[in-house]
């Protein structure tokens, strides 16, 4: 299967520790989804996507993602996904040998726990080159605000690309004007539309945090040592960004050489931000920011936080802000291991168990819409229909009533042909106007966030931006569960070949 030459290359490649996370994890609403690249085969394997609450993982099973564009060995990996009351969808991001960022959309077959491909898209743009060792972070903001993806460019600056229904994939901004010391990035957003924090390795002693405000400027800060100017933004001249060498710092980063394989960032229900990494001592570390003051959190005992297999090891984090739940995944004794914070306390760690053999005749239990699910399903999953589910149902109804299923299938097939053409011709796959169809993104399931008014962003008073910036996000749509379906799901838009609904939904209706 693997030629001797490529085997030799693989051994070499595996010997060099990649500087980015080859594990990714996210919370779907019903459970965590884990994907990881096998450094030997290059294949990306996943935890069965029909699991509720308790993930399983096999290092040898057939659970490999069906990807039309091959990921490079040691790819960056990031993903996001949701549950729509019927199935889970995964939207994953990875890099290819020629350093393009690819988005693959995958839908779960709830009977087998395997993913089916729903499309593959190049989302990076040629004039903003991607660093060959970049890591990736993705945020799913909601049906109106779409996706944001963070990566390092060839000058090691953090870049943001985005997707909305209106704009398709586009480069948004270079959010750190100055070069970062190491291409590792983590991102999370509070459950309000644009309250995003992104963390990056600034230098061998400090991290940089970028946070987004409604005016589209990103506010920069560093820790443990702050920046000299009181306020630095993404618009600053890179030469004006420097550390304040006179201030007394409260701590130094523990077991930190500025070369982590991965950085995790999470925000809890009281809006405390946490940065996670595996240090040079192979241990998990947690730094927190409460009221803008960064401090080191105490480590947990080794039955809670086991020692990782290597220093600066790979790490993936799945979190749910509303319940403050955090799950971390890394290798312990050669097994993917889950470290869990749930119901406001740490639980003993567990290596992920082997999944049950894939069968096609015993359907996995699917919770009903009232939310009865197998044990260990978190409360969040039973909180009622998510926006995604509701919009999905609304879409289904609209489609059913007007009988657009056939049109949708035709559009889907047309788009597939276009995709196949794009995949076979790398030049054609470069994102450009109307060249690559927009992905058939289903609406993600953001939920309203009680208590978001306590959010601490505004505690720090920033001066108004020097110039008015066009505000893509100036009108934030409320993303409560009651949100009505967006006009995009209605008839006229469906005549556009790149619209999502006509593409994706009818396929689901056809499934047996
Ligand atoms: C990679 O794949 C090989 C061959 O299937 C397997 O033996 C090995 O355990 C896998 N490694 C991981 C980390 O999954
Ligand atoms: C990427 O990482 C490899 C292995 O650590 C290193 O040899 C290479 O120089 C890095 N590439 C860049 C552009 O920094
Ligand atoms: C962050 O959340 C607070 C509280 O909801 C809100 O006032 C503020 O506008 C939000 N900031 C952004 C950038 O959305
Ligand atoms: C550095 O920090 C100190 C203490 O907060 C402050 O007094 C000083 O103005 C800062 N220096 C610069 C250049 O910002
Ligand atoms: C930072 O802010 C303080 C208080 O507002 C001010 O005294 C100081 O001059 C500022 N420092 C810089 C470098 O702008
Ligand atoms: C150190 O901690 C104190 C409060 O404990 C805080 O006021 C101060 O800003 C912190 N200094 C730095 C450099 O973070
Ligand atoms: C968390 O709390 C819920 C509700 O009290 C409970 O059903 C669930 O089993 C708890 N989970 C864990 C891991 O303790």
Image (cartoon, rainbow, N blue to C red):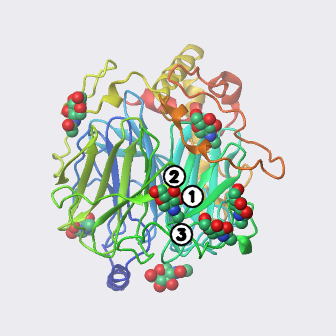
Q: Few, some or many C-alpha atoms within 10 Å of disc 2 (few <14, some 14-19, many ≥20)?
A: many
- Residue 110 x, y percent position in the rendering: 30, 36
Which quadrant: the N terminus? Answer: bottom left
In 3D space, how far apart are the residues under numbered discs 3 and 2 (Cα atoms)? 27 Å
According to the picture, the residue beneath numbered tag 2 turns out to be 138
Q: Is residue 403 visible?
A: yes
Q: CA distance from mark 2 to mark 1?
A: 6 Å
Residue at 50% over, 28% down: 448
Residue carrying label 3? 225
Are circles 2 and 1 on residues that touch, CB within 8 Å? yes
What residue does disc 1 label? 150
Residue 475 drawn at (x, y percent): 71, 32
Q: Residues within 10 Å of mark 3 (few under 14, many from 20)?
A: many
**Depth check, front residue: 240 or 394:** 240
Identity of the residue drawn at 36% across and 71% down: 254
Q: Which one is earlier in the sequence, the residue at label 2 or at label 1?
A: 2
Q: Secondary structure at mark 3?
A: loop
Quadrant position of ligand 7:
top left
Count of numbered badges drawn on the protein: 3
Q: Is residue 391 left or right of residue 486?
A: left
Disc 1 is placed on an element classified as: strand
Disc 1 residue crowd, few under 14, some 14–19, many 20+, Cα 10 Å: many
Where is 29 relative to 333, above or below? above
Give the residue displayed 23% in from the left and 71% down from the top. Answer: 309
Q: Quadrant of the C terminus?
A: top left
Which mark sits nearer the N-terminus, 3 or 1?
A: 1
Looking at the rendering, which quadrant does residue 155 occupy?
Answer: bottom right
The circle drawn on residue 261 is: none
Q: Is residue 69 left or right of residue 40?
A: right
């Amino acid at each position: 299967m693997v030629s001797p030459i490529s085997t030799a290359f693989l051994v070499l490649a595996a010997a060099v520790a990649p500087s980015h996370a080859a594990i990714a994890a996210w919370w779907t609403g019903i459970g965590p989804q884990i994907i990881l690249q096998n450094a030997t085969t290059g294949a990306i394997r996943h935890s069965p996507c029909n699991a509720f609450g308790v993930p399983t993982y096999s290092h040898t099973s057939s659970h490999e993602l069906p990807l039309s564009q091959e990921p490079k060995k040691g790819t960056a990996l990031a993903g996001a996904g949701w549950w729509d009351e019927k199935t889970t969808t995964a939207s994953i991001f990875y890099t290819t040998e020629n350093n393009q960022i690819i988005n693959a959309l995958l839908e779960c077959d709830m009977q087998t726990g395997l993913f089916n491909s729903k499309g593959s898209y190049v989302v990076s743009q040629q004039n903003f080159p991607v660093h060959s060792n970049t890591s990736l972070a993705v945020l799913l903001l909601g049906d109106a605000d779409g996706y944001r993806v963070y990566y390092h460019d060839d000058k090691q600056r953090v870049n943001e690309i985005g997707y909305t229904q209106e704009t398709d994939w586009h480069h948004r901004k270079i959010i750190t004007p100055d070069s970062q010391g190491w291409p590792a990035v983590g991102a999370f957003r509070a459950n309000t539309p644009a309250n995003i924090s992104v963390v990056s390795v600034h230098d061998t002693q400090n991290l940089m945090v970028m946070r987004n405000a409604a005016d589209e400027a990103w506010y920069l800060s560093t820790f443990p040592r702050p920046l000299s100017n009181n306020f630095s933004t993404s618009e600053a001249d890179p030469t004006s960004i420097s550390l304040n060498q006179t201030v007394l710092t409260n701590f130094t980063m523990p077991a930190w050489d500025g070369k982590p394989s991965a950085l995790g960032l999470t925000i809890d229900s009281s809006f405390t931000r946490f940065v996670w990494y595996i240090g040079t001592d192979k241990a998990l570390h947690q730094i927190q920011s409460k009221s803008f003051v960064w401090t080191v959190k105490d480590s947990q005992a080794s039955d809670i936080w086991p020692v990782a297999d290597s220093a600066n090891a790979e790490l993936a984090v799945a979190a749910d802000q509303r319940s403050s739940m955090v799950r971390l995944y890394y290798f312990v004794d050669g097994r993917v291991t889950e470290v869990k914070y749930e119901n406001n306390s740490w639980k003993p760690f567990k290596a992920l168990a082997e999944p049950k053999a894939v069968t096609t005749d015993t359907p996995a239990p699917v919770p009903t819409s009232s939310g009865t699910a197998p044990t260990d399903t978190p409360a969040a999953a039973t909180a009622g229909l998510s926006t995604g589910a509701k919009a999905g149902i609304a879409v289904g109804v609209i489609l059913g009533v007007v009988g657009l299923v056939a049109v949708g299938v035709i559009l889907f097939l047309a788009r597939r042909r276009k995709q196949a053409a794009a995949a076979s011709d790398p030049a054609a796959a470069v994102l450009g106007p109307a060249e690559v169809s927009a992905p058939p993104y289903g609406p993600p399931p953001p939920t309203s966030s009680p208590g978001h008014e306590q959010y601490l962003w505004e505690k720090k008073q920033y001066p108004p931006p020097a110039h008015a910036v066009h505000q893509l996000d100036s009108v934030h749509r409320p993303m409560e569960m009651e949100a009505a379906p967006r006009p995009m799901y209605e008839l006229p838009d469906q005549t556009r070949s790149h619209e999502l609904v006509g593409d994706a939904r009818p396929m689901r209706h056809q499934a047996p």
